[in-house]
């Protein structure tokens, strides 16, 4: 987690009982991320609260940009998964 924050990468947090997965990380200063945050959608998570999620198009683009930066096929698999769910 500390390495991810130092390198300005996202990291995942998993909640075991519900199997919910959340990506966390520092807020980048780039225009794309700021605009994606403005486009995020607020959804009811359960009876007690809400959560905000990025729209699918922004997730796919972010994964493609991460692939270009790192060369990791994991990002392509993630992008394909988002497209499959959409």
Image (cartoon, rainbow, N blue to C red):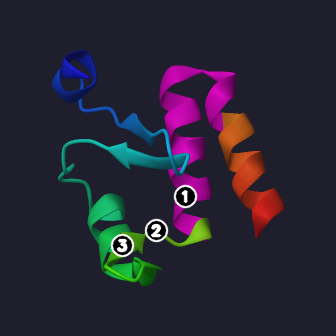
Q: Residue at 70% of width from left, 37% of height from top?
A: 76
Return the residue at label 3: 51
Q: Residue at 68% of width from left, 48% of height from top?
A: 79
- Residue 59: which disc? 1
| Image location (x, y in percent) of residue 82 | 70, 56
Q: Residue at 49% of width from left, 39% of height from top?
A: 16
Instruction: Please say if 24 is above or below 34.
Output: above
Labels 3 and 1: the sequence-earlier one? 3
Q: CA distance from mark 3 to mark 1?
A: 16 Å
- Residue 2: which disc? none
**38 and 23: which one is in front?**
23
Provide the residue span drawn in magenta: 57-75
Q: Which class describes the residues within 10 Å of circle 1: few (<14), some (14-19), or many (20+)? A: some
| Image location (x, y in percent) of residue 51 | 36, 73
Magenta-span inclusion, residue 53: no
Instruction: Please say if 73 is above or below 63.
Output: above
Return the residue at label 2: 54
Q: CA distance from mark 2 to mark 1?
A: 6 Å
**35 and 43: which one is in front?**
43
Between marks 3 and 2 in the image, the one whose residue lies nearer the viewer: 3
Instruction: Please say if 14 is above or below 39.
Output: above
| Image location (x, y in percent) of residue 23 | 40, 45
Name the side, left or right, on which 8 lies relative to 66: left
- Are discs 2 and 1 less than 8 Å apart at CB? yes
Quarter of the image where one finds residue 78: top right
SS category of the residue bearing label 3:
strand
């Amino acid at each position: 987690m500390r390495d991810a924050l130092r390198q300005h990468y996202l990291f995942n947090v998993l909640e075991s009982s519900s199997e919910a997965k959340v990506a966390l990380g520092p807020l980048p200063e780039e225009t794309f991320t700021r605009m994606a945050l403005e486009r995020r959608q607020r959804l009811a998570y359960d009876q007690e609260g809400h959560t905000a999620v990025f729209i699918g198009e922004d997730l796919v683009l972010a994964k493609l940009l991460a692939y270009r930066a790192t060369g990791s096929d994991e990002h392509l698999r993630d992008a394909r998964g988002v497209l499959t769910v959409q």
